């Protein structure tokens, strides 16, 4: 019995397992447990998490907080923490499978980066139907051709079996026009895209108010043109 107790105590908790295996590893109840951090004296955290997941499954966005607060042991703080995590996840995943027909279609999904004080360079991967597969942050900081390497860009596209990509970055300065570095880096990536057979459809620059599309301004060209 003593040996069994020691073995059990040595078992890694859900946080350690998640750090090792990634956020796809825990079940829903365990994700809620990590958000809550602890239960109450009356209710163990796993039991509380199971009740919360049931309420989430039975609620709409409009009444989620209200329904969560009906659970014994869930006050306004815990209810808002759970609802905020769900809302953040919704905002970060609402781009999945969204069709991109024009440059403006991509802007709503990257607008959150426009308010950042640092430049974020993004790669948006698309399938054959020109639907978004995923949005990736490749680098943070001033963009130049040495930081944005084709290997990093197209490794993401190949991994996701993308047929095309759109690159995007924000301009914290508020001047939504491409710099010489922006143009040079785009030329390098465009030439690499032709070699890789993965189309570079556009380079979109966003700021708080508007956007600039290389495609719309006829700035997508290769060395041979």
Image (spheres, rainbow, N blue to C red):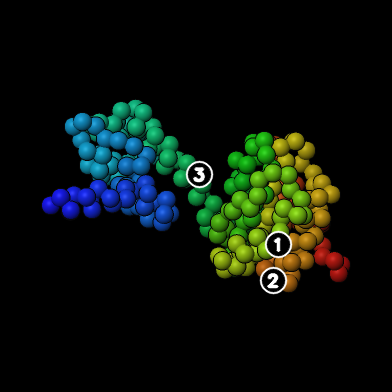
Which mark is nearer the camera, 2 or 3? Answer: 2
Residue wearing tag 1: 150
x 12%, y 52%: residue? 1
Instruction: Decide which of tag 3 and tag 1 comes sooner along the chain.
Output: 3
Residue wearing tag 3: 91
Residue 133 place in picture, x, y as percent? 55, 59
How far, Cα to Cα, is label 2 from label 3? 32 Å
In this picture, is 48 found above or below 222?
above
Residue 27 place in picture, x, y as percent? 33, 52
x 64%, y 36%: residue? 115
Q: From the viewer's side, name the closer residue of 210 and 183.
A: 183
Label 2, residues with CA under 10 Å away: few <14, some 14-19, many ≥20: few
Instruction: Decide which of tag 1 and tag 2 comes sooner along the chain.
Output: 1
In this picture, is 193 found above or below 50?
below
Residue wearing tag 2: 196
x 22%, y 38%: residue? 44
């Amino acid at each position: 019995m003593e040996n069994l107790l020691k073995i059990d105590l040595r078992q890694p908790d859900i946080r350690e397992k998640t750090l090792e295996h990634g956020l796809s590893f825990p079940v829903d109840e365990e994700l809620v447990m990590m958000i809550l951090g602890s239960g109450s004296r009356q209710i163990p955290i796993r039991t509380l998490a199971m009740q919360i997941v049931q309420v989430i499954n039975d609620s709409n966005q409009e009444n989620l907080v209200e329904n969560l607060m009906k659970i014994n042991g869930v006050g306004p703080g815990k209810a808002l923490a759970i609802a905020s995590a769900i809302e953040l996840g919704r905002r970060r995943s609402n781009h999945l499978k969204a069709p991109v027909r024009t440059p403006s279609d991509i802007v709503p999904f990257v607008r959150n980066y426009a308010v950042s004080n640092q430049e974020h360079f993004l790669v948006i991967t698309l399938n054959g139907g020109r639907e978004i597969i995923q949005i990736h942050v490749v680098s943070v900081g001033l963009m130049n051709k040495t930081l944005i390497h084709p290997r990093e860009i197209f490794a993401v596209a190949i991994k996701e079996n993308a047929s095309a990509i759109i690159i995007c970055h924000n301009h914290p300065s508020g001047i939504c026009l491409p710099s010489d570095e922006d143009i040079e880096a785009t030329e390098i990536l465009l030439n690499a895209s032709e070699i890789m057979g993965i189309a570079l459809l556009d380079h979109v620059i966003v700021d708080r108010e508007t956007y600039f599309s290389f495609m719309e301004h006829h700035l997508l060209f290769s060395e041979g043109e």
